[in-house]
Amino acid sequence: MEDEIKYLATHSGTFHADDVFAYVVLNKVFPGYELIRSRDPKELAKAEIVFDVGGGKYDHHTTEKEYRENGIPYAAFGLVWRDFGKKLLSSWIPEEHLEYAHKKIEDELVLAVDAFDNGVDIMKSPIVDIPTVSSIISEFNHRMPKDGNTVEEYTVFTQAAEMANSIFMHKLIGIRNQLLAKGKIIEAFESRKTPELLELEEGADWGEILAEIDTNEEVLFVTYPKPDGYYIQIVRKEKDSFEARKDLPESWAGKRDEELGAVVGIDDAVFCHPARFLAGAKSKESILKMAELALQA
């Protein structure tokens, strides 16, 4: 089918995040095509794939709207991701992890964009207006030409797509890096000397993996290196919670350098966050001493 794709098409005028992200995915799966932005049926008919307009397979503005099992309706992003997501991921993710990566992007990015486009309120705060990926992408429409200049319209759309592409690629690369680090995190978990402490030899996105493997919730702190030193970090009770299984000692809160070093008893302490979820030192030896003291506190 890829060899047959010469044109992709979506509607002209105001756009939303679902058609912009759908374009980002199709752009990666079918490079070298020409994008048509129009509402003219004759123009749309030139394209092999038409999305978010035209009443076809990838247009959710029909009376036969498709719904997921969780009740969230599909929009253009979700419809395109469902059919082409794994093909895109196959260049980035090992085959045995394709299902996981496809679902993770669906759950953490696609669902919210589709819900927003279909008017499903999934996030509301009585205090602040919470920005979403969809609302940020929509801001580009303020630059749409009022005279219908198609060249300027195309420019604004592609600028929005560049931002969407950056968001999408950061998500994808984060998942890939997480999968690459998973084996090392499991190895460190299984070989740890102190059940409450996970020592990592390199920085990694460890939170979700640790929650998966630490079924008894034993680990309280994680230590790891970064280019500027070594860190100790708390383990959250739940993914979306700020509450820790155990906080760093209260006497460390907000202290830096010599002041923190005097409390801890080391000469290369760097800082402890006032919220007591993160602290740093310049050497591995010192960060492990801090971990020992934190566990005893």
Image (cartoon, rainbow, N blue to C red):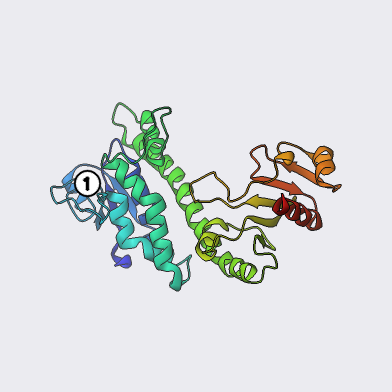
**Residue drawn where x is 29% and y is 27% of the image:** 147
**Residue drawn where x is 58% and y is 51% of the image:** 245
- Residue 196 image offset from top left, x and y in percent: 65, 60
Quarter of the view holding residue 144? top left
The local secondary structure at tag 1 comes to loop
- Residue 110 image offset from top left, x and y in percent: 36, 51
Quarter of the view holding residue 164? top left
Q: Is residue 40 left or right of residue 233?
A: left
- Residue 285 image offset from top left, x and y in percent: 81, 58
Work out whether residue 123 or residue 296 is closer to the camera in this orientation and state it: 296
Would you say residue 156 is visible in this rendering? Answer: yes
Q: Which residue matches tag 1?
A: 53
Query: Is residue 173 depicted above or below 137 in this figure?
Result: below
- Residue 101 image offset from top left, x and y in percent: 43, 62
Amino acid type assigned to the residue bearing label 1 in the image: Val
Q: Is residue 204 left or right of residue 115?
A: right
The N terminus - image quarter = bottom left
Work out whether residue 255 or residue 154 is closer to the camera in this orientation and state it: 255
